[in-house]
Image (cartoon, helix red, strand yellow):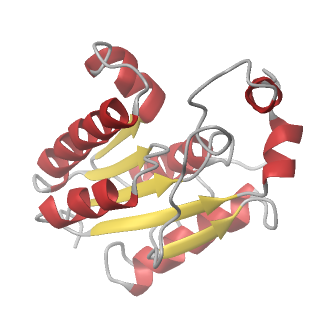
Amino acid sequence: MGNQGFTLWFTGLSGAGKSELAHRIQRCLALEGRRTELLDGDEFRKAASADLGFSSDDRDINVRRIGYTARLLSRNGVAVMVACISPNRLVRNEVRASHDSPFIEIYVECAIEELVRRDTKGLYAKAMKNEITEFTGVSSRYEPPLAPDIHIRTDADDCSGCVSRVLEWLAQHRLITCGECEGRDGERSRT
């Protein structure tokens, strides 16, 4: 079980908490000696998809590239966390189908009102005023998963509770041991 690779694919709108959850879970698993990797959509785009724009086709290509990278890592025993909006349901399903190892789709949902409130850069407000075009969830479509493996509501539960739900799911499905990360939310100590 300790060498079993898998991909945790966090999908949801910008600001929903995908990256924070992925970081905390990665730290937790790494502290337990797991080989882990985090593929953050924004960082991946800068490093490996800088040639792409934000059209629907370009977004799909970017998601496929992230999916390919996650597949290679996970089939080689790495626990991969992917934090990526990935708005197209069919492309997410395509990435799932391409995986040789377990692929766990985690829908990180948050009400738009809360996303606007959290948005320190004011991107949602600008998108709602048409100052930003092609903004997922406002002027560009986001297709939520129809049957995600795990459904998280970050506007209804705190981050530690959300992390615990994911870890419990992984333990129940025998991807981590029951004691692995017990009582932790990805931090060595909690404040």
**Does the image show residue 17?**
yes
**Residue 14 x %, y %:** 63, 40
**Residue 40 x %, y %:** 43, 35
Q: Which quadrant of the view contains residue 110?
A: bottom right
> Could you tell me which residue is drawn at 37 percent across and 23 percent down?
45
Q: 85 or 137, which is in the foreground?
A: 137
Task: Judge whether 86 appears above or below 92 on screen.
Answer: above
**Residue 176 x %, y %:** 36, 72
**How many numbered discs, if any?**
0
Left or right? Give the position of 170 relative to 90: right
**Residue 68 x %, y %:** 17, 44
Q: 101 or 15, which is in the foreground?
A: 15
**Does the image show residue 184?**
no
Q: 118 or 30, which is in the foreground?
A: 118
> Could you tell me which residue is drawn at 47 percent across and 79 percent down?
169
Q: Which quadrant of the view contains residue 38?
A: top left
Q: Could you tell me which quadrant the N terminus lies in?
A: bottom left
Question: Among all residues in the image, which is located at the extreme bottom?
Answer: 172
Task: Judge whether 130 appears above or below 136 on screen.
Answer: above
Q: 82 or 25, which is in the foreground?
A: 82
> Could you tell me which residue is drawn at 24 percent across and 46 percent down?
67
Task: Judge whether 170 appears above or below 139 on screen.
Answer: below
> Could you tell me which residue is drawn at 67 percent across and 48 percent down?
16
